Each structure stands twice: as structure tokens, then as C-alpha cells.
Amino acid sequence: MPVPPAGPTPTPTPPPNVLVTANAYILPDAVALGPLAFGEPPMIIYKGERLRWVNLDKTTHAIVADTSGVPDFVETGTLPLLGERSSVMTATGTTTFHCTIHPGMVGTLIVRER
């Protein structure tokens, strides 16, 4: 029978924290889609996730929050086709948002506890 090695038992290394990314797409022909420009409302993600905006439309867009209900919501700045911007949601909350270039493009973001 094998003899266990002398000394303390090694502690396994915990896995690294993996940051989940929730992708928010600005859909093709988004201006014509209005409240569906970002898909079916509301957009729901979880605290601790990275919110990544990706513009799939040929038109430039700029997304901003309408309230401070989601304190980590970062304005995207102008996003050209395939442009992206990310931020990590560290608090729960709800806000509506819109495109500053195309105000008819609106949505709702809800950040929940997992």
C-alpha cells in the first residue's frame, strides 16, 4: 500500500472568477424597429455580469440611460457598425435607455441578483 507524502496536504487552486458577458445588440435597421431596436424588451442581466453593446446596424448609434436606476450603465458614445462598448454591472436596478441620435429607439434594462 502506498505511503502518503509527509507534510501538509496541498490545497487545490480555486478556479478563476469568470466574468459572464451579456451581449446587447443594436439590431440591423434599428431606427425602423423603434422599441424593438434592441430585441424584445426588457433586457435582463445579472449583477456581476459585463454588459456588452454591439452595433449590428449600418447606422451609427449612441446609447444612454434615462435614469440613474442602474448606476453602472455607461454611455456607449458613438458606435459605428460592429462598434462595441462594455461595462460591468455591480448593482441591481432598472432604467430605460435610448439612442441619442435616434430617440425613437428605446429600451429597458433590468439588472437582478443571481
Image (tube, rainbow, N blue to C red):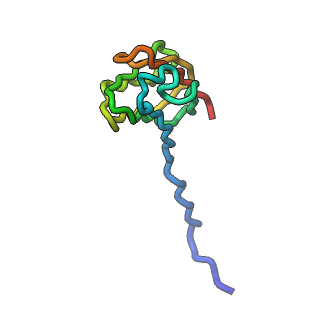
Residue occupying image coordinates x 65% and y 84%? 2
Give whichever of 67, 14 is nearer the camera.
67
| Location of residue 76 by image quarter | top left
Residue most extreme to the bottom: 1
Question: Where is residue 48 drawn, in percent x and y?
Answer: 52, 35
Left or right: residue 99 compared with residue 44? left
Query: Residue 47 at what x, y percent from top left?
Result: 55, 32
Q: How many marks?
A: 0
28 to the left or right of 70: left
Looking at the image, residue 84 lies above or below residue 95: below
Q: Residue 33: x and y, percent?
A: 48, 24
Residue 41 vertical placement versus 25 (above, below): above
Nearest the camera: 96 or 49? 96
- Between residues 63 and 71, which one lies in front from this camera angle? 63
Name the one closer to the observer, 92 or 77: 77
- Residue visible at 39% across and 36% down in the picture: 56
Which quarter shows the N terminus? Answer: bottom right
Q: Quadrant of the C terminus?
A: top right
State the residue at coordinates (57%, 33%): 46
x%, y% of residue 15? 53, 54
In this rendering, is residue 114 above or below 63?
below
Outermost residue, right side:
1
Does 69 sit above or below residue 22?
above
Q: Residue at x 58, y 76 (%)?
A: 5
